[in-house]
Amino acid sequence: MKLLRRICKWIGIVTLVVVLVSGLYLFVAYWQSSNDCDRNTVAPAHPMKAIRKCEYGTVTLRAVEKPIPTDDQVLIKVRAASLNAADGHLLRGFFAMRPLTGMRKPKDSRFGIDCAGTVEAVGKNITQFKPGDEVFGSANGAIAEYVCAPQRTLVTKPENITFQQAGSVAVAGLTALQGLRNQGNIQRGQKVLVNGASGGVGTFAVQIAKAFGAEVTAVCSPRNLEQARSIGADHVIDYTKEAFTMGEQRYDMIFDNVGNYTIAERRRVLTPNGICVLAGMGSAGKHEGQWSRLAGNLKSFLVSPFISQKFKFFIAKVLQADLTILRDLMQEGKVKPVIDREYPMSETAEALSYLEEGHARGKVVITIE
Ligand SMILES: NC(=O)c1ccc[n+]([C@@H]2O[C@H](COP(=O)([O-])OP(=O)(O)OC[C@H]3O[C@@H](n4cnc5c(N)ncnc54)[C@H](OP(=O)(O)O)[C@@H]3O)[C@@H](O)[C@H]2O)c1
């Protein structure tokens, strides 16, 4: 009994010390957290305009120093960029992520991921690009007049698409491609359903699934049915009238951008060895049912190893080989980025608010004047 009391006492002391030390660490980290918006107080010698997230929750247009490429970087004069759900998440900074992204302020104030533009200069180790080349891909801080990126996150822009279209491809296009091919193992002739077919990822998923030879069913709201057909969907389902999980059709793959049905409901319409690829949990914005969808999808992910139908969650990776596949698909006319709205850089906050309403019809693009 005495020994038990002693063990409990020491567990209590150790727990208290851990809590106090972590609290102190978080307190110091919180107040020490700063970024280059605080540090760069003198006027830039070579100014350029860029969007910065100096504080969590707000973006501002600032004059900042034009970046200089390292030996392994390409300097791009940005012509267009686009917004993704991830930009909003990073801007708000989920509390669980803040030890990594900065406790009080974002450590990295740069904003935007997808971009397209013209190569202005290259570092001495760059072999694939030269000044004047038109490129697209991914670059941290894309919503700016200039941005630096490693060559492995860029490819040349096909001539048949605009900078605005090219600047909308990276995150959404890669998510669709990697979800369908790597997670879903898409095969010619398969029946693929895209839930959330009219947004940024969905419009790429419908076209890429068609390019792989699948028979595609697109689920969207009534105002987007025609758009879904125009980008190649064989069948369309209006989710305001009909739950796809109640139909008679069975699918080899559900590419799910929404996650608004239970495991049992989705299993009902999957073939016995069908795969549900969990790309997203709704739309870019915050919406009702967000947490229950998250819980439902986590549950399906945990149940998946024990059933014949598979539920697969993934995070897209920026791979040059996959950007090249997307480039080739666009060059062949098999994929055409769908652009909903274009905003100037000075209206990035408005553009993000629009995207986060959750009903974008394709991609929301920022044009760099
Ligand atoms: N896994 C990854 O690596 C990765 C990468 C990028 C994005 N994502 C995630 O993927 C999801 C989609 O991203 P996004 O960029 O495509 O978002 P988005 O552009 O906001 O599009 C979401 C679409 O969902 C549709 N929608 C909303 N409620 C619906 C419902 N009940 N049934 C069917 N469709 C519905 C909306 O169309 P209507 O207007 O017709 O309702 C909207 O067009 C987000 O959760 C995002 O976080 C994941």
Image (spheres, rainbow, N blue to C red):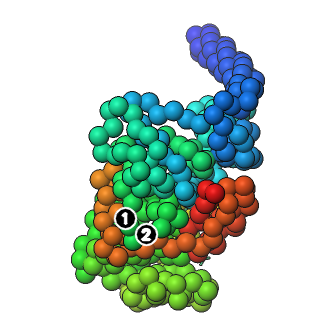
Query: In the image, is the residue at mark 1 within 8 Å of ligand 1 by its beta carbon?
Result: no
Q: Quadrant of the C terminus?
A: bottom right
Q: Quadrant of residue 4?
A: top right
Q: Residue furthest left?
A: 188
Q: Closest to the observer: 63 or 229?
A: 63
Residue 150 image point, x, y percent? 40, 40
User: The residue under label 2 is which amino acid type?
Assistant: Ile
Q: Badge 1: few (under 14), some or many (20 or more) residues near its Cα, within 10 Å?
A: some
Outermost residue toward the front in this view: 132
Residue at figure coordinates x 39%, y 30% from the top left? 71
Quick one: 129 or 324, which is closer to the camera? 129
Q: Position of residue 113 (x, y in %)?
A: 53, 50
Residue denoted by label 2: 161
Image x and y of residue 350, in percent: 74, 61
Ligand 1 rendered quadrant = bottom right
Residue 342: x, y in percent? 63, 67
Give the residue at mark 1. Answer: 158
Please give the name of the residue rendered at 34% of the width and 76% of the height, measured from the top-left corner: 334
Other-residue count near label 2 (Cα within 10 Å), few / some / many at <14 / 14–19 / ≥20: some
Task: Work out whether 297 lies above or below 20.
Answer: below
Which residue is rendered at x = 49% and y = 54% of the image? 117
Label pair 1/2, CB-CB below 8 angstroms? yes
In the picture shown, does residue 221 fall above or below 355? below
Instruction: Count all numbered tags in the image, as a single digit.
Output: 2
Q: Nearer the viewer, residue 173 or 265?
A: 173
Q: Can residue 93 be seen in the rendering of this structure?
A: no
In this picture, residue 1 sits left or right of residue 274: right
Q: Is residue 326 above or below residue 33?
A: below
